[in-house]
Amino acid sequence: MLKSLRSYGELTRLEKLDVDNLIRDNGIKPCDVYWQYDSGWDDKRIANNFGITRQSVCAARASTFGKLAPKSNFGLDDDTSISQIRDHLFRLEEKIDNFVDMFS
């Protein structure tokens, strides 16, 4: 017997937060409109982790993070480049924080 999948609306607030956090932790927002998952991640994988429909994750992701980015528009055809950009941004943020601390 197949287990029926729940919709996003059937989740508790804490479960919805967990879905949003998993989406956020496995992608990057290259611009205001679009969302790009890291390599190996997509709406289906998020849905499978929570036993909810892919359509529910798609709606939640679109509402909170934006539409999926067409890769060709950002020149990010190599999946590793998203991780490299994120790592670079984190290092830059640390340097900025250290710089600001020098004058505080």
Image (cartoon, rainbow, N blue to C red):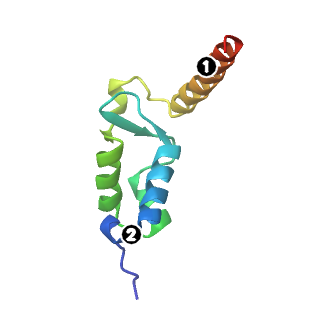
- Which image quadrant for residue 65? top left
Count neighbours of disc 2 (C-alpha within 10 A) and say few if under 14, some if 14 to 19, many if 20 or more. some
Q: Give the amino acid at mark 2.
A: Leu
Q: Residue at x 56, y 24 (%)?
A: 89
Q: Which residue is mark 2?
A: 11
Q: Which residue is mark 1?
A: 92
Decide if residue 37 is on the left or right side of residue 100.
left
**Which image quadrant: the C terminus?**
top right
67 up-or-down from 104: above or below: below
Q: Residue at x 31, y 61 (%)?
A: 56
25 up-or-down from 13: above or below: above
Count neighbours of disc 1 (C-alpha within 10 A) and say few if under 14, some if 14 to 19, many if 20 or more. few
| Residue 48 at x, y percent in the picture | 46, 64
In the foreground, 44 or 12: 12
| Residue 64 at x, y percent in the picture | 34, 46
Q: Earlier in the sequence, mark 1 or mark 2?
A: 2
Q: Work out whether residue 69 can be spotted.
A: no
In the foreground, 52 or 20: 20
- Which image quadrant for residue 101? top right
Q: Work out whether residue 95 can be spotted.
A: yes
In the foreground, 104 or 53: 104
**Which image quadrant: the N terminus?**
bottom left
Q: Give the amino acid at mark 1.
A: Leu
| Residue 13 at x, y percent in the picture | 41, 64
